[in-house]
Amino acid sequence: MFRELAALTRREFLKLARNPQAIFTSLMLPLLYLLLFGNGFSFNVAQFVNHALPPPEQQQQLSFLLDQYFRGAPNYYSYFAAGMVGFVTVTATLFIGANVIFDKLFGVFKRTRGTPAPSAAVFGSRLIAGSAQPILLAFFVMGLALAFAHVSGLHGLSVTLPVGPVGALQIVAAIVLLSVMFATVFLTFGVLIDVPQTYFAAVNLINLPVLLTSDALYPWGTMPAWLQNVSSYNPVSLAVNVLREVMFGSGAYPYGPGVYLLGLFAWAAVLVGIAILLVRRALRPLE
């Protein structure tokens, strides 16, 4: 089992390494988001401060507005950059299932299933390789946003708290859980669906509502109460909340990062469990 899993996983990574065009385009998308969307929609709450107040009260009002709108982030770009980490992690998993469908059309998946490798190794290898790319992209986005903070004329990610070993592990855990969760979901769709058009219609039906009901892009204070309630249970929001609390502080959040990680783990456990049952049933006739 483990030998087959290692061999198939190596093959999936080799396929990715031999496709530099796909790597380049996957890097360009977050770069454009950070350069254009983040800088173009920068939202300054300082304009709402009552400048007739004494300076100490102005500072208190500014801190209140930052907590209300950006949940402790020093500016919209920093709030947005942390959200983009979750956004990219999800969108980068979309094509994992599509690759399975194209492999079905060209007979590659059938030939792989014809080998002695068990279905768990076939599915697991694609899941490992498919999860690794979003994880690397997420850290690429974070590093790029941090680098932009040192470029004149650009907004960048400003981390206002020291990130220790525990905080770093919490960030890594949030990104890994989010990547594995959605990679499993979309990979399962790829196993169950045979038509590319049907696949993309199905994943967009999940992808867009999940992203648009999260607080990855929207300032928290601009969301209506019902959307805030929905966003509070959204897995993308849970992961992004961990990042923001570690980098900006927990004062604007009702719970600590550990609680949000537990919620994210619960989402992952449920979705991965359902996926295992569906994939096992779908691949059973081929064993």
Image (cartoon, rainbow, N blue to C red):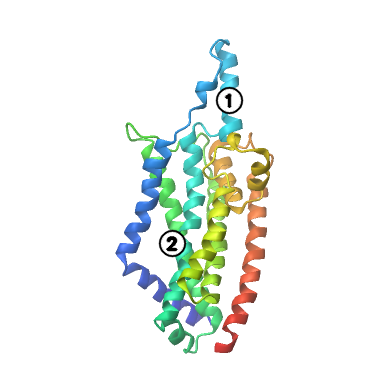
Label 2's element? helix
Q: Name the residue under label 1.
A: 63
* Image quarter hosting the N terminus: bottom right
Q: In this view, does 192 lie above or below 35?
A: below
Vertical side of 223 occupied by 28: above or below: below
Left or right: residue 116 versus residue 239 is left
Q: Give the image location of residue 222, x and y in percent.
A: 58, 35
- Callout 2 touching callout 1 (CB < 8 Å): no
Tell me which residue sits at (51%, 31%) in the image.
Answer: 74
The reply to whether residue 128 is visible in this rendering is: no
Residue at (42%, 39%) from the top-left corner?
38
Q: Which circle marks residue 133 in the picture? A: 2
What residue sits 48% from the left and 63% below the top? Answer: 94
Identity of the amino acid at label 2?
Answer: Gln
Q: Residue at x 46, y 85 (%)?
A: 110
* Residue type, numbered disc 1: Ser
Image quadrant holding the C terminus, namely bottom right
Q: Mark 2 vs mark 1: which is more N-terminal?
A: 1
- Against 218, residue 124 (above or below) is below
Graded by Cα atoms within 10 Å as few (under 14), some (14 to 19) or many (20 or more), the crowding at tag 2 reads some
Residue 220: percent from left, percent from top: 59, 37
> How would you rate the neighbour count of disc 1 (Cα within 10 Å): few for under 14, some for 14-19, many for 20 or more?
some
Q: What percent of the width, then of the height, locates residue 7?
A: 43, 79
Whole-number angstrom distance, CA of label 2 to CA of label 1: 37 Å
Image position, residue 129 (x, y; %): 45, 68
